[in-house]
């Protein structure tokens, strides 16, 4: 087995603050502003009926967070992280369970 060699310019470790800038955003915005932004995004779900609010909630959350004073890049990163955690991450256990049930011929 051979070890994977990283190119010389790549860092060995990536700081968490570069991956998830949530902590920086949380320090910038009061909790009340984030709650109002979330409530505004849930109203967007009712106005644009898409499955899981995909797209409309994301856009509304970014706009609401930017309107309350968050930087646009940080707000977009936070909304994408939120969407990955709440929408796409729960699909992994379901896919693994479905694969196991099909393999066992239960389904």
Image: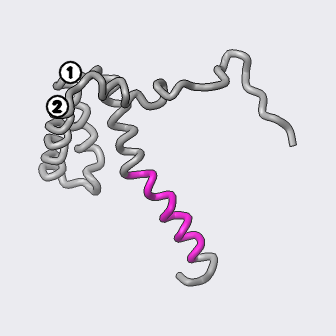
Residue in the image at 23% along x and 44% along y: 56
Element under disc 2: helix
Residue carrying label 2: 33
Instruction: Please tell me which residue lies in front, 72 or 56.
Output: 72
Q: Quadrant of residue 13?
A: top right
Other residues around mark 2 within 10 Å, as few (<14) / some (14–19) / many (≥20): some
Q: Which residues are magenta?
A: 87-101
Other residues around mark 1 within 10 Å, as few (<14) / some (14–19) / many (≥20): some
55 lies left or right of 89? left
* On-image quarter of the N terminus: top right
Contact between labelled residues 1 and 2, with CB atoms less than 8 Å apart? yes
Residue in the image at 50% along x and 28% along y: 16
The reply to whether the magenta stretch includes residue 75 is no
**Position of 80 relative to 25 (above/below):** below
99 lies left or right of 87? right
Residue most extreme to the bottom: 106
Q: Position of residue 8 (x, y in %)?
A: 73, 17
Element under disc 1: loop
Which one is earlier in the sequence, the residue at label 2 or at label 1? 2
**Position of 74 relative to 41 (above/below):** above
**Position of 95 relative to 60 (above/below):** below
Residue carrying label 1: 69
Q: Position of residue 34 (x, y in %)?
A: 21, 34
**Distance in Å between CA atoms under marks 2 and 1:** 9 Å
Residue in the image at 57% along x and 25% along y: 14
Q: Position of residue 102 (x, y in %)?
A: 58, 76
């Amino acid at each position: 087995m051979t070890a994977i060699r990283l190119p010389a310019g790549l860092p060995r470790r990536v700081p968490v603050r570069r991956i998830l800038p949530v902590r920086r955003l949380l320090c910038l915005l009061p909790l009340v502003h984030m709650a109002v932004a979330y409530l505004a995004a849930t109203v967007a779900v009712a106005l644009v009926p898409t499955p899981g609010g995909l797209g409309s909630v994301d856009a509304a959350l970014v706009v609401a967070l930017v309107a309350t004073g968050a930087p646009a890049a940080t707000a977009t990163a936070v909304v994408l992280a939120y969407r990955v955690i709440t929408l796409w991450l729960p699909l992994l256990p379901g896919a693994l369970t479905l694969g196991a049930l099909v393999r066992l011929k239960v389904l």
